[in-house]
Image: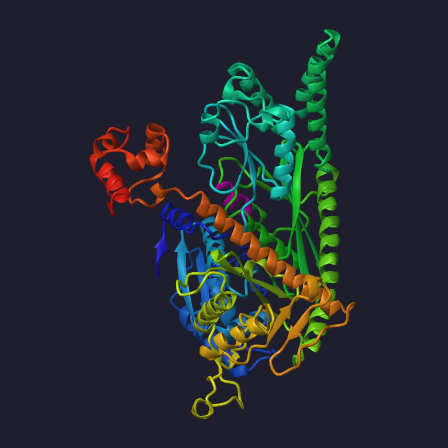
Amino acid sequence: MPTLPTGIAAAYIGAMSRATRSAFDDVPPDGFDEDENEAPSLDEAPEIDFDFEPGAVKAGTEIIRRFWTTLPTSPGVYRMFDHKGDVLYVGKAKNLKARVGSYARGQAHSNRIARMIAQTAAMEFVTTATETEALLLEANLIKQLKPRFNVLMRDDKSFPYILLTSDGPAPQIVKHRGARRRKGNYYGPFANVWAVNRTVNALQRAFLLRTCSDSYYENRTRPCLLYQIKRCSGPCTGEISSDDYVALADNARAFLSGKSNAVKDRMREEMQAASENLEFERAARFRDRIAALSAIQGTQGVNTQGVEEADVFALDEQAGQFCIEVFFFRNFQNWGNRAYFPKADRSMSADEVLASFISQFYDDKPAPRLVLVSHTIEDAELMAAALSSRVEHRVEVHQPQRGERKNLVDYAQRNAKEALGRRLADTASQGKLLAALGQSFGLDKPPRRIEVYDNSHISGTAAVGGMIVAGPTGFMKTHYRTFNIKSEELSPGDDFGMMREVLTRRFKRLAKEAPRTPREGDVGEPQAAAEGQAVPAATEALPDDPDAFPAWPDLVLIDGGAGQLEAARASLAEIGVIDVPLVGIAKGRDRDAGRETFFVPGRTPFKLPPRDPALYFVQRLRDEAHRFAIGTHRARRKREMTKNPLDEIAGIGPTRKRALLHHFGTVKAIERAALEDLAKAPGVNAATARAVYDFFHANA
């Protein structure tokens, strides 16, 4: 059993960069009192009273009992595995022996815990020096392994920030996401990228700061269009002095740091002074800048007077589903909010779900000084200590009872209630649409997973295939996939060949990652071979979690007519997949929406009634696939258009590429340069110069 002493555990935790703190409280889920240091006695036989096979639960209990006998009483993290080696649950404990022993006693378990015990085939343990380290390690493992019996935070994308740089020739204001490696001041987090874009645009009008890259800035000989439309002060060509531009940047920092009223007061004074001096154009510029700052404050919704820096978490529960609304307050300003819908068993309490979510939330982002919550967090002090260990300040986790803080939590909770209500309504409508679609296409039951495929290219160049996925909750964007068309045998514009390649790659990988078991009554391999049929891939094995989103599609929609459909059917049959329903969607005359013709194998082509909700649903699916494929194609084409040949040379990184371009000016000049001239470039040694020369003269 590995033991992680203080320091080593922290390093181990830090190495698992994408993991999180989940947090079941330290009190075992079955009511076992773990406060005592003594381990529980397991002499009594387990008494199980659940809707499960008694043998399965008893078998799992015996497995846990065998591991329990050798456990220490120190803090640590434990993992439960099923017979396939998949992680069922990750938990922490301040006393491993006491905590694991609570599972082996077999008394007063909930159905969720009983299912988990019944499926347990093995366990692993890591001891830590403190309970705080155990909490951090547990969270990292949950985020990495995604056990089905833990609360899972579904959306773990990083939040955007505003960056005001301090490492370039003139401060630059840009949106930033990811690691904070660049020198400068970071402001945020913002709830979404639209809030950042809106704020940056307003700050441009208010402070006239540049947003261009350093390379663009350094190569300007005259001001760009942003200067002409009064969105930049033109520091690149000296339209503003260096001192005046630094003053503008300082004003922007003051505004973003919460001193917005002081900045606006100074601007009003300068506007009044310019007006009194009859400098009306200058006064008008200050007027417009004040209006831009007011627009930023007006779009921030509720702001605070006494809470400088805080994140507010409020949870609402309806119909067995949870919604957590998160508000971000920085520098007395509201930087937006976002609703989350974590995956959690409906038997779990709201307190437990909220605690687990908050622990996971701060895995890849720093916690503010104050975290306000709507429900009681039993281990609030432990969570605060864990969050404080990741940042350079003390973090407080607090459930307010009165005052402005309570008003902020109530406001967030109203938003959570409304967001969950909208989601439930959308889910009900989505369920009706799926049922109608299944009936229209002759499916046995409403589809739970729909995949839609489309290709995009220009005369065969930069060809990509796109797959979008829809399910009971709408578009499942985390399941979207793109396929760069790689085959060199395809003629330019061969849509049929592109579709064959996309579907072949998709379903070959799917059959490997999620193999299916034979369905009773399917055509067997000898009979199929004799009849010239492909052997069916059979049915997907039922997951242990009935609410899990299926890996195999219940319906595949192809953007195209009979030819595209036949190409899709043939490509799937070649790899043994013949039981996935396929439907081709041919655009109507003049490509008008509402006149689509549907092609289903074995059926005469047909149309849906013009006002059929299922028809509108299909149009939405097709348009989303079209949008996704075109967007991916444009991104690939843009990358290829801006690709630099120097990127293909081994040993040429950004620094040496910049040195070569600064020395020679263009790639063409580098290509024509002699070996001796290349070696004279700053930062380029003889080996690098030889590599560059050989790359451009390999076929000479």
Magenta-highlighted residues: 382-390
Residue 75: quarter of image: bottom left
Left or right of 206, for residue 41 = left
Query: Colour scheme used in the picture?
Result: rainbow
x and y percentages locating residue 457 in the rendered image: 52, 56
Q: Where residue 343 sits in the image (x, y, percent)?
A: 60, 61
Identify whether 338 is placed above or below 437.
Answer: above
User: 42 or 274: which is nearer to us?
Assistant: 274
Residue 350 visible in the current orientation: yes
Residue nearest the viewer, comparing 336 with 436: 436
x%, y% of residue 670?
31, 35
Closest to the observer, 460 or 111: 460
- Decide whether residue 388 is among the magenta residues: yes
**Residue 326 visible (yes or no):** no
Residue 652 placement, left or right of 464: left
Quarter in which the N terminus is drawn: bottom left
Which residue is situated farthest in the right direction here?
611
Task: Name the residue rendered at 27%, 44% in the picture.
Answer: 695
